[in-house]
Amino acid sequence: FCSSPTGYISDGCGATYKEVEDKNKVIRPLIKDLVTTDYFKYYKIDLYERKCKHWADESLCGNRACAVDTIDDEDNLPDIWKPSNLGKLAEDSYSTNENGSQSEVGDYGPNDFYAEFECPGDNDKDFCVPEDETFGSPGVYVCLTDNPERFTGYIGASANKVWRAIYQENCFSSKENETSDSTSDNINRAGVELGNFILGQNKKKSHDIGDDKAMNFEGQCLEKRIFYRLVSGMHASVSTHLSYEYLNTTTGKWGPNLDQFMSRVGNYPERISNIYFNYALVSRAVAKLKDYLGNITFSASSSEYDTQIRKQILSVAEKANSSPGFNETMVFSTPEALTLKDEFRMHFRNVSSIIDCTGCDKCRLWGKIQVSGYGTALKLLFGLPDTPNSNTVVANEVISNLRRTELVALINTYQTLSKSIEAITYFRDQVRSRLEIE
Ligand code: FAD
């Protein structure tokens, strides 16, 4: 861990680890500023009413650090987030489908099993269940900068079970895993095996960053590897944040904890690699957005604010576009892979419903934001045309269906990854200093 990572991130990603670190040095101050704007720091989320649908509710984290401070008085919201303005925005530029009509309740994807996890206004192109910000929908307002992702003390069987269930979503039923009697039992068994491997019960360890063999990737297609890397990268990013802002219970102070980082992330090169992979993938999605920012209304009530936010996102998107990154044209590019696309989308949506089972409000908040952020990134990557403005009908459909909550989740997810890269370089310096002292 103490030497800087070298080589390519792979799996559709032409960037090197160094290029990601260099890019992040430029993007870091810009994205930090962007997430403190009113547009990006407030979020409406259904944090309490979507019950866990996968198992009976279990223990809830009672630590103060697990709690979320919500905004209960609407007067404390900035104008652009007041329900009256949100209603107007939704009518102006959101929630219309390709026929120009509002999406209808029950407009679900092809697989009934997953339909129960969906909600009104869902679009079958979505990779996750978007938060519904429209007036009267269930949910609470949260100021994200007042509720940072950091150590909460949510540990033990409940937390492990959620991660395990999420990894089991990596089991796909399509051809590659199919046996002659491909029943759901077989599918579940394969998922459990993969989950066990990932949860460390196979006692195998990898030694090289991006070592696909060590990650049990042999024979897996690109799309399945991407799914796994997204989930593992998100998990590693959460672990990095909780180690970067850890509570020292003796002093009562928050600060970086190198031992926590090493035991959760630093000693596992593939986990670090997956954070870089996610960074490159989300960078590409943000970069793709740059050609369509003119079609998005950021404030219906103030043209000055509208221009300011567009300008700020544009500068992030331009920098995100500055070096080679993720190449989405390699994914779902063969007829076999195309059949995986719906399944990939359904599994990803299911991950967002599993997060509802997280027994810590703060962890659930950031878990849901990040899954929604990755879902939005995937929607932009595979929905927007590869060449800017080459298919305006398709692009307009994707952009006009983009909700504010999705955009806020995307940018905040980018910021969490950016912070993770910063934290990794910080911890690397710490390890080097330790070695020098010894
Ligand atoms: P866990 O992190 O629970 O991991 C379980 C097992 O998964 C490990 O034993 C390991 O074998 C494997 N594993 C770990 N990381 C990876 C990886 N990157 N890739 C592949 N396999 C891996 N805690 C906080 O303090 N703050 C938070 O903001 C927070 N957010 C959370 C959000 C969600 C959605 C969930 C489910 C939990 C969250 N937690 C948070 C709890 C935290 O993630 C851990 O679950 C908890 O600290 C217990 O850690 P652990 O050591 O038991 O291993």
Image (spheres, rainbow, N blue to C red):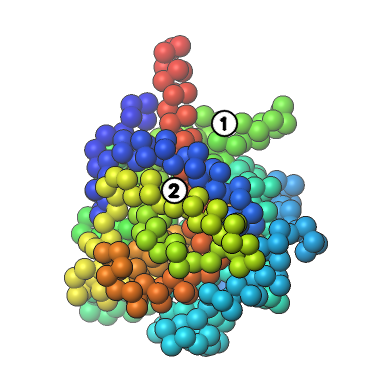
Q: Amino acid at mark 1?
A: Pro
Q: Nearer the viewer, residue 153 or 151?
A: 151
**x then y, percent, for residue 27:** 44, 42
**Is residue 159 in sight in this rendering?**
no
- Identify the image quadrant of the N terminus: top left
Q: Earlier in the sequence, mark 1 or mark 2?
A: 1
Q: Nearer the viewer, residue 386 or 331?
A: 386
Name which residue lies at 48% across and 35% down: 423
**x then y, percent, for residue 46:** 65, 68
Q: CA distance from mark 1 to mark 2?
A: 30 Å
User: Relative to 5, does residue 70 appear above or below in the rendering?
Assistant: below
Q: Which mark is residue 256?
A: 1
**x then y, percent, for residue 289:** 40, 60
Name which residue lies at 28% across and 61% down: 328
- Identify the image quadrant of the C terminus: top left
- Nearest-to-viewer mark from 1 and 2: 2
**Is residue 87 found left or right of 241 in the rendered image?**
right
Label 2, residues with CA under 10 Å away: few <14, some 14-19, many ≥20: some
**x then y, percent, for residue 91:** 59, 79
Name which residue lies at 55% across and 87% down: 105
Q: SS class of the residue under badge 1?
A: loop
Q: Amino acid at mark 2?
A: Ser
Q: Which mark is residue 315?
A: 2
In the orientation shown, which residue stands out farthest toward the top?
Answer: 437
Q: Is mark 2 within 8 Å of ligand 1?
A: no
Residue 33: quadrant of the picture = top right
Name which residue lies at 53% across and 66% down: 297
Residue 273: quadrant of the picture = top left
**Is residue 231 found left or right of 47 in the rendered image?**
left
**Is residue 42 in sight in this rendering?**
yes
